[in-house]
Image (cartoon, helix red, strand yellow):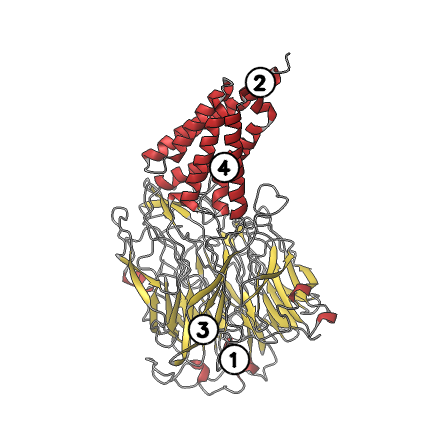
Amino acid sequence: MSARKPYRLAAWVLGAVMVVVGLILVVGGGWLIVLRGSGYYLLAGLGLLASGGLLIRRHPAALLLYAMVLLATLAWSLWEVGFDWWQLAPRVALPCVLGIVLLLPWWRKPVASPLGSGALALAVGLTIGIAVVAQFIAPGTIEGRLDPERRAQVINEAQVAGENWPAYGGTNAGTHYSSLDQITPANVGRLQEAWRLRTGDIATSTSPPEITNENTPLKVGDNLFLCTSHSRVIAVSPETGDVRWTFDPELSRMGADDFSGWAHMTCRGVAYYDVSDYADTAGSGVATGGGAAGSDEGPVAPRVPSIGQTDVMCPRRLFVPTADARLIALDAQSGERCPGFGVDGEVDLTRNIGDFAPGGYYATSPPVVTEHLVIIGGHVTDNGSTDEPSGVVRAYDVGTGELVWNWDSGNPEATAPIAPEATYTRNSPNAWAPLSVDERLGLVYLPTGNATPDPYGADRDENDETYGAALVALGLATGGVRWRQQFVHHDLWDMDTPAQPVLLDLQTPDGMLPAVIQPTKQGSLYVLDRGTGEPIVPIEEVKAPSGAVEGDFTAATQPRSTLNLLPPPLTGSDMWGVSPIDQMLCRIQFHALDYRGQYTPPSLNGSLVYPGNVGVFNWSGVAVDPARQAMFTSPNYLAFVSRLIPRDGEDDPEASASEQGVRPNRRAPYAVELGPFLSILGLPCQAPPWGQVAGIDLGSREVVWQHRNGTTRDSMPFDLPIPLAVGVPALGGPITTAGGVSFLSGTLDQYLRAYDLTSGRELWKARLPAGGQATPMTYRGRDGRQYVVVTAGGHGTFGSRMGDYVVAYALPRDALP
């Protein structure tokens, strides 16, 4: 074999590869043009095909032609996406690598040409130079600072957690804020693990596909209270994590121990009640809602509490929602059932509900507790059928478990306790997210979902249309509607109101206003007067796309808050990939789907839903600092695809046990296929960032800073030497503290992170043993240290590592202020 033969063979092999790739781009690019997409891929394919053919023939023009292809690719990329590195990379990285390979002797010598070699070297150098410059540019990032000296004139203590963390959101106001300030931006870097607990509650082959560990612990006095996916409750020492007692509700009545057919299983938290917290108001009527200003219920006689400090059993109690639809009251000190509550310490939440599949109805979120009431909503499985359980919200006597009132959105005026033989309205909109309460105003706030199925609403009645995808305020005394504000009209996109409403006294030029802030899946942050429901921040009705399937309709407009983190509409240039080929295929998918911006109606062809039904915000919500009048948020940006499937009589399509995949929608004309908008490699088809953190000044109503958050670690098929900081989704909420430090653990990579609330700068992170898809909490221990605790148990459908961990962090003693 002559010395030149290996070079010729190498040139032939590489040329053949270029021809094959060129053919793929020509075919795909031609189809993309038919779909009215970019013509680049066809032209690039032709250029690659020609240069590969020339290389096979060892023609001197091969390098020159490829240099022209690379320069044209660079120019097109800059025209489409500018200096956005994460958008440039899939367009130019592999073509640039190919250019480098062609300059190596094995491939350059057979087609040696000073002009071709020089032109290609210039094209490669220019591409590398622009890539280096793009590393220092972050389009879409907002660099600003919240005013670190700003303080509200008055802080409502009902909106602030302190030494303890007695409610899911810190308090019943849901601010996720603590007045503790031991941990600061100056010392947070010294946080270290204080203790670690394994609960023993792990996913098995009989678990649902979406088994999740979303628990936010409570801390009151000498105990930290946890719940697990299987509704087990554990009390531990706040300083050491040593177990004090456990309670297992034994989820057996819903079908042995096999839960694999359920859509999901979770416990976000338990609720705490201490009668001594109301010692100064007992018998005053303050907490009952009676006589509140503007009440349409009229004065209400004070109720005598059915539980008192002198009671031997359970003056301090936990309320535990179970996955088999029970509400159990436990003595907070011993973990024993409270015998005076319901029957043997529990209330049967399936009463008056009617038939449902196991797992199809239960409370995923903790109840909310007032002086006299424990109030609970419920999850209803989406898109199972048009005959699902009611979305009723029920208020029980905190002491006896007696039903005091029920609010069924399908029969909203009838709030008196239902008759034993009656059934609540089937399929009525529910309230599955955590609730909030203002006991001084006498109102409980319900974020509502929709009547199922989500993508087809022709059969909904007037009440469904009125109360779906809304925030509804009920009077505490009788459960009567005081006001409601709807956020999606005739929702066909699963835009449930997903998060706990945040109650905040908002400082304005007109003085302090009682506000409620509602985060939503569609990205709007609605700011309303919590007494009247009137907007404080303007809400605009924006034109929405039409074109629902036959028999259904769409609303002409949709409400949008002027304070929002809504992303701009997607375009073909927003499609992403790790190479030009999978990016091209994503563009083909994009143009083949129905998409006319937000609220494109579901279709038989398949519609792109952006933001998708995971939402910009979900159950994890936001954190608000009442002192600084600032908000810390973690918005997500993922597109989903919704495709309607005509049903053939009563035959069900092959359905998924998860709430993604094909869902049957029994008794509706269409089943629906739901899922994220992914490439052939399983990565999002849209360009990053897919998750960010943002800081909002609530006084000026401005997003002051916004940064990409999280890396590709733990979400790639293989670990890269350096995880890519693309910004990944987070499912798990933030908290913030008076020390000016915010914490978030919900990202796809397994970290608990700390941020400077003023600037959003990441200050510290700790590696978690599993996915941290839960909201952290903080408290002060008896040793004087401020602890930050997070559940690290993973999330089935989110794809993070499963586990059974609860981890606590604190400053070492020599770092205490």
Q: Residue at x 34, y 46 (%)?
A: 595
Q: Which of the 4 image quadrants contains residue 298? A: bottom left
Crowd around label 3: few <14 · some 14–19 · many ≥20 (10 Å): many
Does residue 90 show up? yes
Looking at the picture, how far across and down is residue 516, in whole percent? 41, 72
| Amino acid of disc 2 | Leu
Q: Nearer the viewer, mark 1 or mark 2?
A: 2
Tell which circle, 2 or 3, labels the residue nearer the N-terminal end: 2
Quadrant location of the C terminus?
Answer: bottom right
Looking at the picture, how far across and down is residue 727, in whole percent? 52, 52
Residue that mark 4 sits on: 579
| Amino acid of disc 3 | Leu
Q: Is residue 774 left or right of residue 296?
A: right
Looking at the picture, how far across and down is residue 271, in whole percent? 54, 70
Residue that mark 1 sits on: 157
Residue that mark 3 sits on: 503
- Pick whichever, 752 or 693, lies toward us: 693
In the rendered structure, find residue 9 and report the number of the disc placed on it: 2
Looking at the picture, how far across and down is residue 372, in whole percent? 48, 78
Q: Residue at x 28, y 46 (%)?
A: 549
